Image (cartoon, rainbow, N blue to C red):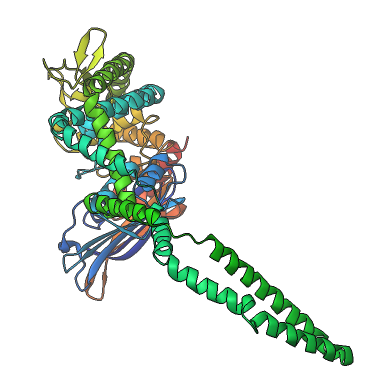
């Protein structure tokens, strides 16, 4: 639900913050007080186009912000995940319109493009008034509403899985067929490159190891000379290092016998001698292992040369050479077995088309069955709302696939065009006058009649409609008396499953409010400012009385308001 609406420096509004609640939120006020400005601001919040003309005189920018409770809204959660936005119990939507012409959009304080604001709004709010943000006036939503009413989630989920699998297979075979000639042209090239790379068969990290071995072999004579000199100086020469250190140890031992404070020094000297012996042993072992191998030297040089040549030709590194080999190997295998791969894919596509077709047939049958119930209930609701001679129709059509087209699914022996809902196209048709043919709902003229049509549809589809917030502007246009009471009761019933925000001029509707707000216009520093306030119980009675009798509130009007509101609470 919409918890908070903040509007700052927007048209006649200087700064207001409205705390909406669950149930039926009613907004009233005199003509020109600013009610329509509230709706316009909400439309801006839902992704409608902005103009710098909305910026209040003297301000630099307008700000509209809404805080929505979305903890249980799975669609909003998925939307946030898909767009890498943080999901929390609340979704904060903000629009800023500057005099400079900049239009900034934010979701949970993250800057986003306008289209994301609109996508989020489409998941949250259905706004009925002189706006485009009306889901029932978008034909593509009709099938979703019908499916929701029919509770087809399980069947649609199964169909969707098969549908996207079919699209993937079709995309794969299309890409293969498009590259068929290229594969045939490159087959010989790939064969040559595979043979060239496999002849060397470079291994990861091999080059570094070979370079290290080459460096040792190229310096083997020098290494033999140096290690021989080291070992001779340590052990073999007359007066060698070990002989001299042995003499020193003898003297240290004699001193330690006299003065025990040399004990640690003698121990450290012994440790140093042990380390020297280890170094000497390693040098001797290394020297003895040195072999002068000119054949191995040339072998390494030749292999390194071959690896370097491959690197130059195939990407600059051994890893890139190996990756290229894997890629062209797969391409070569595909070229060699192209016909078989195409045949396998075609069999999978044929099977997938039949699977999709079987599920689509069941979905279509369910839609046809439930459409009769929807027709009956909507016509009853319209009659209840004062459109007695209405006819409502759910048209479900499907088209055979064009001859030669590959874009089809198979239902038994027939081929049909298809989409992500199955084989059906659904559109609502309506006639509101006796003797007239039904026409597409999206072409019905705007006005109070449209609002009542929407209300009838919403009351019928309420349990299936996943949009949590419904906003009605001028829902009472062209109605009065008993019909107004019916409209109010329908809104009240709808408010049990949706948060309703409605602007009205009629006491019969206002009297049913769970929460009542009044929009007022006043002068502030020689300027007109619109404001809104939540009414307590006493002020609600006064406001309903004002709607009944005009600006002058009489005791009779107050009594009438109390009676009307008492009746509404039964």
Q: How many numbered dots are placed on residues in this image?
A: 0
* 285 or 364: nearer the viewer: 285
361 displayed left or right of 499: left
Coordinates of residue 279 in the picture (x, y in percent)? 62, 71
Q: Residue furthest top?
A: 413
* 241 or 61: nearer the viewer: 241
Give the quadrant of residue 55: bottom left
* 332 or 546: nearer the viewer: 332
Residue 470 visible? The answer is no
Give the quadrant of residue 386: top left
Residue in the image at 31% along x and 44% along y: 200
Coordinates of residue 295 in the picture (x, y in percent)? 38, 53
Residue 135 visible? The answer is yes
Coordinates of residue 504 in the picture (x, y in percent)? 29, 45
Q: Residue furthest right?
A: 258
Is 400 placed above or below 278 here?
above
* 393 or 537: nearer the viewer: 393
Q: Residue furthest front?
A: 238
Give the quadrant of residue 168: top left
Is 216 placed above or below 267 here?
above
Coordinates of residue 67 in the picture (x, y in percent)? 39, 54
Residue in the image at 38% along x and 23% along y: 158
Residue in the image at 71% along x and 74% along y: 274
Is 373 placed above or below 56 here?
above
């Amino acid at each position: 639900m919409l918890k908070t609406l903040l509007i700052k420096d927007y048209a006649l509004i200087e700064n207001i913050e409205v705390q909406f609640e669950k149930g039926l939120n009613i907004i009233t006020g005199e003509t020109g007080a600013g009610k329509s400005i509230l709706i316009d601001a909400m439309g801006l919040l839902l992704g409608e186009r902005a103009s710098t003309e909305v910026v209040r005189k003297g301000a630099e920018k307008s700000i509209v912000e809404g805080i929505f409770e979305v903890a249980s809204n799975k669609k909003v959660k998925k939307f946030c995940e898909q767009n890498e936005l943080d999901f929390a119990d609340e979704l904060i939507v903000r629009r800023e319109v500057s005099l400079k012409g900049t239009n900034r959009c934010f979701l949970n304080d993250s800057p986003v493009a306008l289209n994301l604001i609109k996508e989020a709004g489409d998941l949250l709010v259905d706004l009925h008034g002189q706006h485009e943000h009306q889901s029932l006036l978008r034909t593509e939503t009709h099938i979703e509403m019908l499916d929701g009413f029919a509770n087809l989630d399980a069947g649609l989920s199964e169909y969707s899985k098969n549908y996207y699998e079919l699209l993937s297979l079709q995309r794969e075979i299309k890409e293969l067929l498009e590259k068929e000639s290229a594969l045939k042209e490159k087959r010989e090239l790939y064969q040559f490159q595979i043979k060239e790379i496999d002849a060397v068969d470079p291994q990861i990290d091999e080059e570094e190891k070979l370079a290290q071995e080459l460096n040792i072999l190229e310096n083997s004579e020098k290494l033999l000379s140096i290690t021989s000199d080291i070992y001779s100086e340590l052990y073999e020469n007359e007066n060698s290092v070990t002989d001299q250190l042995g003499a020193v140890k003898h003297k240290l031992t004699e001193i330690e016998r006299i003065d025990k404070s040399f004990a640690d020094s003698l121990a450290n000297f012994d440790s140093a001698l042990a380390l020297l012996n280890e170094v000497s042993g390693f040098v001797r072992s290394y020297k003895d292992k040195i072999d002068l191998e000119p054949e191995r030297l040339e072998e390494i040089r030749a292999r390194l040369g071959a690896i370097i040549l491959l690197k130059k030709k195939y990407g600059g590194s051994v890893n890139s050479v190996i990756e290229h080999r894997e890629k062209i190997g797969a391409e070569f295998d595909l070229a060699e077995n192209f016909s078989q791969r195409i045949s396998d894919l075609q069999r999978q596509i044929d099977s997938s088309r039949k699977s999709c077709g079987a599920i689509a047939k069941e979905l279509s049958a369910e839609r046809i069955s439930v459409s009769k119930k929807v027709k009956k209930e909507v016509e009853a609701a319209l009659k209840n709302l004062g459109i007695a001679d209405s006819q409502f129709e759910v048209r479900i059509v499907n088209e055979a696939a064009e001859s030669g087209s590959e874009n089809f699914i198979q239902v038994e022996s027939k081929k049909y065009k298809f989409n992500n809902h199955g084989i059906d196209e659904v559109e609502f048709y309506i006639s509101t006058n006796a003797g007239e043919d039904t026409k597409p709902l999206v072409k019905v003229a705007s006005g109070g009649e449209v609002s009542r049509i929407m209300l009838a549809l919403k009351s019928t589809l309420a349990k299936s409609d996943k949009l949590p917030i419904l906003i009605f502007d001028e829902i009472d246009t062209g109605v009065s008396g008993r019909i107004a009471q019916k409209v109010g009761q329908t809104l009240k019933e709808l408010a049990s499953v949706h948060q309703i925000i409605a602007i009205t001029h009629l006491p019969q509707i206002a009297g049913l409010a769970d929460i009542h707000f009044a929009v007022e216009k006043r002068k502030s520093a020689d300027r007109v400012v619109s404001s809104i306030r939540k009414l307590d119980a006493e002020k609600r009675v006064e406001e309903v009385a004002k709607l009944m009798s005009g600006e002058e509130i009489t005791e009779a009007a107050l009594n009438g308001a109390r009676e009307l509101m008492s009746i509404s609470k039964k």
